[in-house]
Image (cartoon, helix red, strand yellow):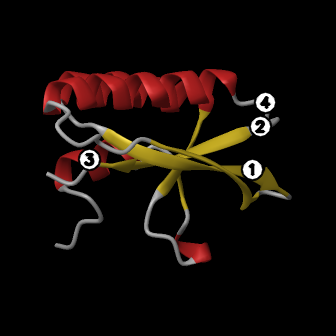
Amino acid sequence: MSFIWSLQVDSILSCGVYLGHLGIKNWALERNDAIRIIDEFEALGIPVLGGDVYQLVDEIAEQTYDSWYCDQEIGELDAVFFARSLDRARRYIHGCSVSGALFVFVPKPS
């Protein structure tokens, strides 16, 4: 079986809208699900490198071209980056003003 991220991450993200029709092997999640998934990533020790924002238009997910990212800084401890990456994702999602936004995560591969 082929996975996009890993069995564990795919099973977490797959509650969202699959974006395969756009040629994107990932899922877009509503705001509440996105926040819950950050909590799950936190419990599992999975940092988030960033993400993109989509919006449903006539039942089809379309890019809004909004996004966020979080790069690990030179010399930054993994634990510090992990916490910072999740904080950045939470703050971005809470502050996003796109109506009906759907969020796509880019977790750091293990």
Disc 2 vs disc 4: Cβ atoms closer than 8 Å? no
* Left or right for 43, reference 48: left
As shown in the figure, which amino acid type bears the numbered disc 4? Ser
Which badge, 1 or 4, comes first in the chain's sequence?
1
Alpha carbon of mark 2 to alpha carbon of mark 4: how far?
Answer: 9 Å
As shown in the figure, which amino acid type bears the numbered disc 2? Gly
Q: Which residue is mark 3?
A: 9
Count of marks placed on residues:
4
Please tell me how crowded label 4 is: few (under 14), some (14-19), or many (20+) other residues with Cα within 10 Å: few
Which mark, residue 100? 2
Closer to us: mark 3 or mark 4? 4
* Left or right for 107, reference 57: left
The secondary element bearing badge 4 is classed as: loop
Find residue 101 and report its horizontal and vertical position in percent.
Answer: 71, 40
Q: Which residue is mark 1?
A: 55
Alpha carbon of mark 3 to alpha carbon of mark 2: how far?
Answer: 24 Å
Q: Is residue 22 above or below residue 28?
A: below
The secondary element bearing badge 1 is classed as: strand
Q: Which residue is mark 4?
A: 97
Please tell me how crowded label 3 is: few (under 14), some (14-19), or many (20+) other residues with Cα within 10 Å: some
Disc 2 vs disc 1: Cβ atoms closer than 8 Å? yes
Find residue 8 and report its horizontal and vertical position in percent.
Answer: 19, 46
The secondary element bearing badge 3 is classed as: helix
Please tell me how crowded label 1 is: few (under 14), some (14-19), or many (20+) other residues with Cα within 10 Å: many
Q: Residue at x 15, y 33 (%)?
A: 78
Q: Residue at x 30, y 65 (%)?
A: 4
Q: Residue at x 54, y 78 (%)?
A: 23
Alpha carbon of mark 1 to alpha carbon of mark 4: how far?
Answer: 11 Å
Alpha carbon of mark 3 to alpha carbon of mark 4: how far?
Answer: 27 Å
Which badge, 1 or 3, comes first in the chain's sequence?
3
Find residue 70 and report its horizontal and vertical position in percent.
Answer: 41, 41
As shown in the figure, which amino acid type bears the numbered disc 1? Gln
